[in-house]
Image: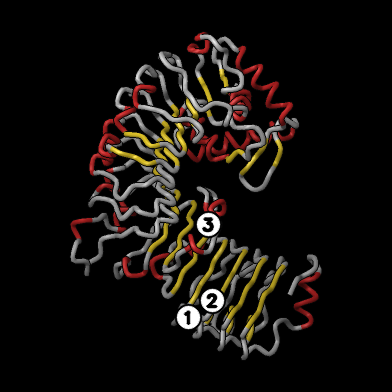
Amino acid sequence: METKTCFLLCCLFPEDDEIYVENLVGYAWGLELYKGMDSIKDVRSEVLASIETLKNSGLLLDCGERHVKMHDVVREFALWIASSREEISFGTVETLPMDESFKHYTAISFETDQTDELPKGVGFPYLKLLLLGSFVETSSEFFEGMKALQVCALKDQSISLAAFKLNMNLRTLCLIDCQLSDISMLGKLKSLHILSLSGSDIIELSTEAGDLENLRRLDSSYCYNLEGFPPNLIQRLSDLEELYLHGCSSLKWATENSTKVESYSSLSELNSLPKLAVISLDISSEHLKDGFVLRRLWSFDVCIGIKRELRYRKRDLETWPISRSLRIDKSVDACKQLLEDVESLELGDVEGHPNLIPSLDLGFRKLTSLDLRQCHSMQCLIDASKQQVPITALSNLRKLSLSHMFHLEEMCNAPQPQGFLQKLEEVIVSDCGEMQVLFPIAELRSIEQEGPVVI
């Protein structure tokens, strides 16, 4: 049943659309599709399993990481099935009947360019899911009769949050690239579990947003004008599991030296959330308090001192809940509890560490990508001269980039661990003048046994 409904959800997306899996996760959670699941992480696992089943059956196509696609013929067939189901009827603007008989539909998508006008005078009393694209204009009155609405996703709309004041069953609300007003009304939506404001024009979340006691996921990514959160707002969201704040270049946090400590939340509030498992975050070095350390998390994507939105395309920055990535300039202290699990690590201008192992971590056994630049204290990646180094040290590394490492002399200053760099696929080295030998011949042969290496 769940896999079938997941399949029908996919047909609500526009023709040839690359469907982002995390959107399906949010919709599935809002519709309570997977009964008995108590965390977004568990629902995500079920959605991914359903997608694999559909791909293996040829009903969905792969189109890059975390995205799937539906063939046009399959989509048309799915829409025909969806519109004829009695217990739950799905439809898009292409398949809606011309009369008012579609008011019994439970899921409708207006995400294509085949209409620029919404139906008028229809209450949609059974509607549970609504997808609304940028091709149509809406008004607050349009939502008034939607008493059963659980999932609502709008794109490129100018709308007041007061439009949803009567939607007391709303569990997932996605307002993407929207112009929003009456933001204080968020606090009235007590049933909200997932809230996405990605790309929307907001300066600050209202204090009332702290009343969302059931909120599990908050996504404010790419809100370039977002300046901060009111003090203590974050710690009030005690059920929060996932927080996405990447690409918020104006975001500020209270610090001990701030003249406006009372104006913003503190980073320390993040560590007070008992269920927080996933975070993406861009932090300016000036907002880090001395002694602040992010606690260990299941998944993370953290930039410190790097304005990533200038360096990465938007799709690369989509909500990415299974990454473990750190990009850090200057100091790693705030992320030292995350180093054991990091998979992609970029360090720039980090001083005070003569080596990577053991100075920063004993093994980096999960690390697959490493980018070091201008870390002038570093003389080798592994110092095995003073203590035993685990045989798993850098054993999963596939990509290595070394740039402007002026004092780096060698990879390892003693016999390397047994599995050292055996999975390496790509090496980029530039401006490392002290390094005379990249790999000893015997070591290079060992690496090449796993496959060719691009240098």
User: SS at mark 1?
Assistant: loop
Q: Quadrant of the C terminus?
A: bottom right
Is residue 203 shown above or below 23? below
**Disc number at residue 353?**
1
Q: Quadrant of the N terminus?
A: top right
Whether label 3 touches label 2, CB < 8 Å: no
Number of numbered discs on residues: 3
Is residue 343 shown above or below 257? above
* Amino acid type at mark 1: His
What's the distance in space between the residues labelled 1 and 3, CA to CA?
22 Å
* Amino acid type at mark 3: Arg
What's the distance in space between the residues labelled 3 and 2, CA to CA?
18 Å
Q: Nearer the viewer, residue 88 or 297?
A: 88
**Disc number at residue 324?**
3
**Res 241 seen here:** no
Q: Nearer the viewer, residue 131 or 89?
A: 131
Residue in the picture at 37% in, 41% down: 179
Binning the other alpha carbons within 10 Å of mark 2 as few (below 14), some (14 to 19) or many (20 upward) gives: some
The image position of residue 435, as x and y in percent, is: 65, 88
Residue in the picture at 75% in, 78% down: 443
Q: Earlier in the sequence, mark 3 or mark 2?
A: 3
* Amino acid type at mark 2: Leu
The image position of residue 99, as x and y in percent, is: 53, 9
Residue in the picture at 37% in, 43% down: 240
User: SS at mark 3?
Assistant: strand
Is residue 330 shown above or below 135? below
Whether label 1 touches label 2, CB < 8 Å: yes
Left or right relative to 285: residue 441: right
Q: Earlier in the sequence, mark 1 or mark 3?
A: 3
Binning the other alpha carbons within 10 Å of mark 3 as few (below 14), some (14 to 19) or many (20 upward) gives: many
User: For residue 166, which quarter of the picture?
Assistant: top left
Q: Which residue is mark 2?
A: 356
